[in-house]
């Protein structure tokens, strides 16, 4: 399987981890998800991310999930390997890369407070996983409480050849994308692939600012594919029209604390997940919330015929 590079583009869908009612990993649903993502036109998949409930999985479960997906798709797969220490990160990286992953994603621990410490952390991570392993910086200050300036990202990209991609989730973050692309154009840093998260909430303008695509888990990834494709083709209105039709559901799914519950519920309604449960502890939707999501889905289905729903 091809490895990630600094020119990787497109949509990498962050897959949720399906569980059954007992909390066990549901491999049948995972197989359906894998086939669905390929049919939806995504460029790749990301497993064991925050929305994949990675902290609730054992090491063995995580590796088994990655191997299960890799056996069922030719799409490149990125694996989240963030861990409190380098030893666990190294062990997981080694196993998933040996299984055929395209690269790994590393988030900073929330204890980092200075630029030098951030750079030193990623230097240590790169040494732990091996210089030949492509890795993604996950820049999500709203969740990790670590502020990475464009200058810090430029230092990491310049010092570490294995750093090939930024998962950009700063908010507001449009100016950061512009700043990074300016640094590249002026020779202050090498090119870095930039894929954006935050549920796709700002993807319509992020792609215009120079992002290469999305790495996120919105429950209708077909829209993310449309926006990236239309922007690349120079059809601005088509990109925004596709985005605007989904904005009410996108906004609802982006609520802190309940976003994954919404995402899993919609994927169950789409016939992809047998069960929308999260592994404990996890949030669930009230009957009122489910009715609101159903209303949004019914309205969206009138605009996007690809959104077919199970009874």
Image: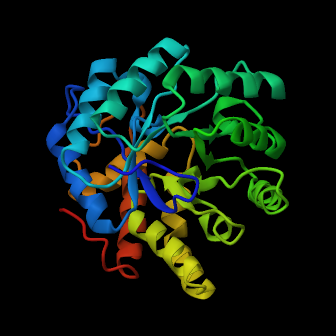
> Where is 26 relative to 82, above or below?
below
Q: Quadrant of residue 238?
A: bottom right
> Where is 24 relative to 154, above or below?
above
Residue shown at the point (42%, 34%) measured from the top left: 283
The answer to whether residue 303 is visible is yes
The answer to whether residue 272 is visible is no
Q: Is residue 194 left or right of residue 31?
A: right
Q: Position of residue 310 (x, y in %)?
A: 19, 62
Q: Quadrant of the C terminus?
A: bottom left
> Where is 195 relative to 48, above or below?
below
Q: Position of residue 75 (x, y in %)?
A: 32, 55
Query: Is 40 in front, or is 89?
Result: 89
Q: Position of residue 209 (x, y in %)?
A: 72, 67
Q: Residue furthest left?
A: 28
Looking at the picture, the colour scheme in use is rainbow
Q: Quadrant of residue 151?
A: top right
Q: Is residue 132 left or right of residue 25?
A: right
Residue shown at the point (54%, 15%) measured from the top left: 86
> Where is 214 relative to 108, above or below?
below
Q: How many marks?
A: 0
Query: Is 143 in front, or is 90?
Result: 90
Residue shown at the point (21%, 27%) measured from the top left: 24
Residue shown at the point (25%, 60%) measured from the top left: 36
Query: Is 144 in front, or is 192?
Result: 192
Q: Position of residue 247 (x, y in %)?
A: 55, 68
């Amino acid at each position: 399987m091809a490895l990630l590079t600094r020119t990787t583009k497109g949509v990498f869908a962050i897959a949720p981890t399906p569980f059954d009612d007992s909390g066990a990993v549901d491999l049948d649903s995972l197989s359906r998800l894998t086939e669905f993502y390929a049919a939806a036109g995504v460029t790749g998949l990301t497993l064991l991310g925050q929305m994949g409930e990675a902290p609730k999985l054992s090491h063995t479960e995580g590796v088994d999930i990655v191997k299960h997906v890799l056996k069922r798709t030719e799409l490149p797969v990125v694996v989240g390997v963030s861990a409190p220490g380098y030893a666990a990160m190294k062990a997981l990286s080694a196993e998933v890369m040996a299984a055929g992953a395209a690269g790994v994603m590393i988030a900073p621990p929330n204890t980092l407070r200075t630029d030098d410490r951030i750079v030193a952390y990623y230097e240590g991570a790169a040494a732990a996983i091996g210089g030949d392993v492509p890795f993604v910086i996950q820049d999500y200050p709203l969740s990790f409480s670590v502020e990475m300036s464009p200058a810090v990202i430029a230092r990491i990209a310049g010092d570490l050849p294995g750093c090939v991609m930024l998962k950009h989730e700063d908010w507001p973050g449009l100016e950061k994308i512009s700043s990074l692309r300016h640094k590249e154009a002026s020779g202050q840093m090498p090119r870095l692939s930039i894929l954006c998260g935050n549920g796709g909430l700002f993807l319509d303008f992020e792609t215009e600012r120079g992002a290469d695509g999305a790495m996120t888990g919105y429950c209708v990834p077909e829209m993310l594919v449309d926006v990236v494709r239309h922007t690349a083709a120079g059809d601005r209105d088509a990109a925004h029209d596709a985005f605007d039709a989904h904005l009410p559901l996108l906004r609802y799914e982006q609520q802190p604390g309940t976003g994954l519950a919404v995402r899993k519920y919609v994927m169950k309604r789409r016939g992809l997940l047998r069960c929308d449960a999260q592994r404990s502890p996890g949030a669930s939707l009230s009957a009122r919330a489910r009715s609101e999501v159903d209303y949004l889905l019914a309205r969206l289905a009138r605009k996007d015929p690809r959104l077919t729903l199970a009874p």
